[in-house]
C-alpha cells in the first residue's frame, strides 16, 4: 500500500499509546483521521482537540461516512481488540486494507534512517530521551509514552530520520527496518505470546539481524554489538556517578572521547543506563556530543515513569507504569535512594492474569521490599480470568506485615490512613486513570 495515496485512516483502538502517536502523525500530514476506542481518556481528549472524530461504542453505524470508502481508507488496529469486534469484522469482510499498528509504523519508517530502541524494560524512556536528543536534527519520533518536554508521544520533524520504540509484544518489532538500534534488556515477559523465555530471546536475535548498520546492547546480554554499562569496561561507559541537588551527574567514556559532568534529572541508575543507551545511538548517528549533553540536561522525563504528582515535605506521591518485577525493583531502588529514611507505601495493580501467574514469586519478592502494600485486583486487559490466579493468591505469597487487598472505591481512604510519607502508584492498567482523582483528594488534606 502506498501511504501517500491514502486519504483516510481509521483506527480501531485509537487511544492506545502507540496507536495515538500514529493518529497524530497522519493528522499532521493532512490525512483525515477518525477512530474507535473502548474508553475516553486524556489521550483521546487530546486527539479530539486536534479535530479527530472518536466514538466509544463498537458499532458500524458509528463509523463516519467519509471512511466507508474501501479504495481510499486504511484501517489500523491494535491486537488488544477482541476477536468479535463488530467494526473490525465488518471492515475485514468488506475488503478494506487492515494493518496492525506495527506494520504501519514499519511502512512509515522503511524509507527513513531508522533509530530503534528495543528491550523488555527501558525502551520508552530511552526512546523518549533519544527523540529529545534528535529533535534539533528534525527527526520524527514515535514514542511509547508522553514525553514531558512535548506533552505528546509524537515529536514531529522531517521524514528523513525516525526514532521508534521497537516493541517485542506480538513480535511487532520484526516489522521494522532499523539502521541503528539498541537492546536494553531481554528479561522474560509476554510469555502468553512466546510460551518460553528462549523464544523471546530468539525474537530479539531475529530483530538484531535486521539492524543494517550498528547494534548497541546493554553489557551482559547474549547478543553481539557495541556495549554500554555503568562502572564497567564497555564501549560506552558511565562512571563517577554522584547525586547533586536531586540530579545525577556522571562522566561518559565513548569509543573516541570523554564527556564530563553530564546532568540528568531522572532518578535511579536504570535511568542513567537509559540515557547512556540514547547517547550511544545518537553519537553513532553523528550527533555532536556537546549537543547530546545539553539535551540530556533539559530532558524532563516521561509521564508515568517515576512521575512526581505530589512533592512536599509531608507527602510525596509518585506514579509509575511498572508492571513487571524488574521494573518494580527499579522503582523501589530509586525510592530508597531518594528517600532512605522515609516509610514507603506501594499501591500495585497487577496487569494480566498470565503475567501474574508467570511471575508470581518474583512479584511477591519485589513487593515485599516496601514498608506497606495496598494490592488492587488484577487488570485483565485482553485476557479472560485464569482459575486460581488472583490478587489474593499473590498477597498470600508476599512476606510483608503491612499488606492489604483493597478495591478502588476505598483506595484513597487506605492511603490517607497510612503512616507512610512516600506513596508510589504502580501498574499498567487503569490505575493510571485513577491517579488524578487520588492526587486531587490527597491535596485537599495538605491544604
Image: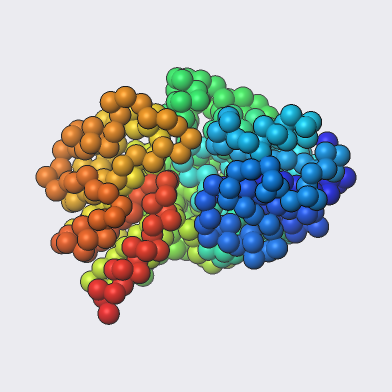
Foreground pick, 208 / 240: 208
Question: What's the coloring here?
Answer: rainbow
In the visual, does 434 lie left or right of 225?
left
User: Residue at the location (54% across, 22% down)?
Assistant: 202
Please provide percent x and percent y for residue 128.
56, 54
Task: Residue at 83%, 38% (x, y): give it.
Answer: 70
Please, which residue is most extreme toward the front here? Answer: 61
Residue placed at 66% from the left, 38% from the top? 87
**Which quadrant holds the C terminus?**
bottom left
Question: Compared to 171, does 257 lie above or below?
Answer: below
The one nearer the camera, 419 or 336, is 419
**Residue 147 seen by the camera:** no
Provide residue 382's location: percent of width, then percent of height: 48, 35
Vertical placement of residue 188 versus 239, above or below: above
Closest to the observer, 433 or 401: 433
Image vertical order of residue 220 relative to residue 323, above or below: above
Q: Position of residue 236 (x, y in %)?
A: 53, 45
Residue 419, image x, y percentages: 15, 62
Q: 278 left or right of 30?
A: left
Give residue 213's quadrant in the image.
top right
Quadrant in the picture for the N terminus: top right
Which picture quadrant has residue 326?
Answer: top left
Count every numbered label the image shows and give the total. Answer: 0
- Residue drawn at point x = 65 percent, y = 26 percent: 209
Residue 383 can be seen, yes or no: yes
Furthest-bottom residue in this view: 447
Amino acid at each position: 500500500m502506498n501511504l501517500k495515496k491514502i486519504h483516510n485512516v481509521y483506527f480501531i483502538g485509537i487511544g492506545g499509546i502507540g496507536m495515538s502517536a500514529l493518529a497524530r502523525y497522519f493528522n499532521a500530514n493532512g490525512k483525515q483521521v477518525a477512530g474507535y476506542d473502548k474508553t475516553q481518556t486524556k489521550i483521546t481528549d487530546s486527539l479530539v482537540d486536534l479535530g479527530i472524530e472518536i466514538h466509544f461504542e463498537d458499532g458500524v453505524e458509528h463509523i463516519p461516512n467519509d471512511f466507508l470508502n474501501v479504495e481510499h481508507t486504511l484501517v489500523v488496529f491494535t491486537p488488544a481488540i477482541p476477536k468479535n469486534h463488530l467494526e473490525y469484522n465488518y471492515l475485514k469482510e468488506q475488503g478494506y486494507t487492515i494493518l496492525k499498528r506495527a506494520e504501519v509504523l514499519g511502512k512509515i519508517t522503511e524509507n527513513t534512517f531508522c533509530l530503534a530502541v528495543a528491550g523488555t524494560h527501558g525502551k520508552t524512556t530511552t526512546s523518549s530521551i533519544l527523540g529529545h536528543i534528535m529533535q534539533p536534527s528534525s527527526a520524527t519520533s514515535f514514542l511509547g509514552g508522553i514525553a514531558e518536554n512535548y506533552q505528546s508521544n509524537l515529536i514531529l520533524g522531517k521524514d528523513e530520520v525516525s526514532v521508534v520504540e521497537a516493541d517485542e509484544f506480538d513480535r511487532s518489532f520484526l516489522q521494522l527496518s532499523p539502521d541503528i538500534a539498541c537492546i536494553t534488556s531481554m528479561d522474560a515477559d509476554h510469555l502468553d505470546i512466546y510460551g518460553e523465555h528462549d523464544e523471546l530471546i530468539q525474537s530479539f536475535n531475529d530483530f538484531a539481524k535486521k539492524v543494517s548498520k550498528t547494534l548497541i546492547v546493554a553489557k551482559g546480554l547474549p547478543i553481539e554489538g557495541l556495549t554500554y554499562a555503568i562502572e564497567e569496561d564497555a564501549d560506552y561507559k558511565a562512571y563517577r556517578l554522584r547525586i547533586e541537588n536531586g540530579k545525577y551527574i556522571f562522566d561518559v567514556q565513548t569509543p573516541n572521547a570523554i564527556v564530563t559532568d553530564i546532568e540528568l534529572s531522572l532518578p535511579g541508575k536504570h535511568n542513567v543506563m537509559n540515557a547512556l543507551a540514547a547517547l550511544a545511538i545518537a553519537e553513532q548517528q553523528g550527533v555532536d556530543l556537546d549537543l547530546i549533553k545539553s539535551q540530556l540536561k533539559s530532558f524532563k522525563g516521561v509521564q508515568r515513569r517515576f512521575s512526581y504528582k505530589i512533592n512536599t515535605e509531608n507527602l510525596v506521591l509518585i506514579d509509575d507504569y511498572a508492571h513487571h518485577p524488574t521494573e518494580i525493583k527499579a522503582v523501589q531502588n530509586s525510592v530508597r535512594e531518594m528517600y532512605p529514611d522515609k516509610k514507603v507505601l506501594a499501591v500495585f495493580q497487577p496487569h494480566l492474569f498470565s503475567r501474574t501467574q508467570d511471575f508470581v514469586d518474583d512479584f511477591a519478592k519485589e513487593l515485599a521490599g516496601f514498608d506497606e502494600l495496598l494490592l488492587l485486583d488484577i487488570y485483565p486487559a485482553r485476557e479472560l480470568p485464569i482459575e486460581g490466579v488472583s490478587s489474593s493468591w499473590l498477597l498470600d505469597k508476599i512476606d510483608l506485615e503491612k499488606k492489604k487487598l483493597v478495591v478502588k472505591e476505598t483506595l484513597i481512604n487506605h492511603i490517607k490512613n497510612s503512616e507512610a510519607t512516600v506513596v508510589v502508584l504502580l501498574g499498567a492498567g487503569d490505575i493510571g486513570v485513577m491517579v488524578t482523582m487520588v492526587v486531587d483528594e490527597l491535596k485537599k488534606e495538605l491544604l
